[in-house]
Image (cartoon, helix red, strand yellow):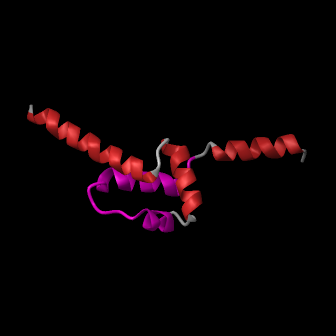
Amino acid sequence: MNQFTKESQSEDYLDIPSSEIVEIVEYLLENYQKPIKIETLSWQAEMGGTMFFNEFRRLTGLSPNNFLNSCAYKAKWTSFVRQT
């Protein structure tokens, strides 16, 4: 296998979301209002902290903390709009 083929395969692999990260994103969308530790999420994903952070950011475009904040802000905004 030449170098180009090896690089192409690794790039293709990087485009596939980790199923563990997808499950964690789903969990966060449903449970953002609860206290959640990022360390616990990385443990559940069976990844080290740095790898979890990088994979999460690659998939969502946000850090785990920013993603949680975004969920909370959207919920508050939706609630506010419904009241007016």
- Residue 46 is left or right of residue 66, and the answer is right
Q: Can the viewer see residue 18? A: no
- On the image, the x and y values in percent for residue 5 come to 83, 42
Residue at image x 54%, y 63%? 49
What secondary structure characterizes most of the magenta part?
helix
In the foreground, 80 or 23: 80
Count of numbered badges drawn on the protein: 0
Q: Position of residue 48 (x, y in %)?
A: 57, 65
Q: Is residue 2 above or below residue 31?
A: above
Query: Residue lying farthest right?
Result: 2
Given residues 72 and 15, the one toward you in this image is: 72
Corner quadrant of residue 74: top left
Considering every residue shown, the one lying at the far left of the view is: 84
Compared across the picture, whether 5 is left or right of 47 comes to right
Residue in the picture at 51% in, 51% down: 56
Residue segment shown in magenta: 17-44
Looking at the image, residue 64 sits to the left or right of residue 50; the answer is left
Work out whether residue 53 can be spotted: yes
Percent x, y of residue 28: 36, 54
